[in-house]
Image: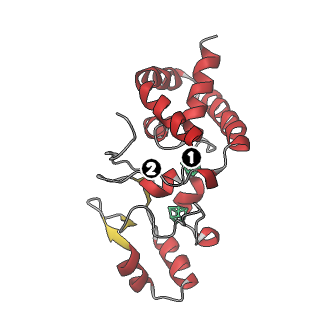
Amino acid sequence: MILDFEFYTSFILLNSSIKCEAPIFVRDMAMNEEYREDLNEAQEKHQDYVKLVRKFKKMKPKKLDNLINEEHDRQFEKIDCLNCGNCCATTSPIFRDVDVKRISKHFRMKPVEFEKQYLKRDEDDDLVLLTSPCAFLGDDNACSIYEVRPLACREYPHTDRKRMDPILDLTLKNSEICPAVARIFKTIESNLSR
Ligand code: SF4
Ligand code: SF4
């Protein structure tokens, strides 16, 4: 599948989730071309990365965490999210009650008003963005509520967390959404095949 126009998937991660619903328009306007190529390459290498994830699943959790966490740090030293914005443009965080309270306070709105204006309940009864791209994503890829953004946004793409093993399938999907994850997979695959 080429991540050119419509992207169809739906996924959830524990209580700090990112969701993506179909159909979602993938913006062309603000994403660095190099990052787009990373995503295209990850889509082309999907089957190789399925095999890589199988290898990950055989590793001891701590070894796996070290491998992915270290590569996360290396890649995010080079990647600039302000030249990308693809997670905010194509997926939705799940908003927890505390997120809604904090963000609505920031806007001096009642939580119920904020929810009505910006959010909806999905088929799992989770609160997700009403529109995509996210209403708080600027044309410059900056988040207009950065200081009070949801926890799920702070944690995305989840490659610096402990216990990567329960979220490997989600991380595989994220390799086609987030160029940093695409590069993490590419580098680890290359290192493991030496
Ligand atoms: S709230 Fe901010 S960080 Fe989260 S999806 Fe929207 S623009 Fe991105
Ligand atoms: S976290 Fe990944 S998808 Fe989101 S803006 Fe940064 S590089 Fe892009």
Please tell me the numbered disc located at residue 58: none
Element on which disc 1 rests: loop
State yes or no: discs 2 and 1 in contact (Cβ < 8 Å): yes
Tell me residue 33's x, y (percent): 56, 41
Q: Residue at x 59, y 33 (%)?
A: 183
Quarter holding residue 2? top left
Element on which disc 2 rests: loop
Where is the C terminus found, in terms of image quarters?
A: top right
Label 1 crowd bin: few (<14), some (14–19), many (20+), radius 10 Å: many
Q: Residue at x 38, y 80 (%)?
A: 117
Q: Residue at x 53, y 25 (%)?
A: 56
Left or right of 28 in this view: 33: right
Q: How many marks?
A: 2
Please tell me the numbered disc located at residue 158: 1
Tell me residue 20's x, y (percent): 37, 52
Inter-mark Cα distance, 2 to 1: 9 Å
7 above or below 106? above
Residue where numbered disc 2 is placed: 13
Label 2 crowd bin: few (<14), some (14–19), many (20+), radius 10 Å: some
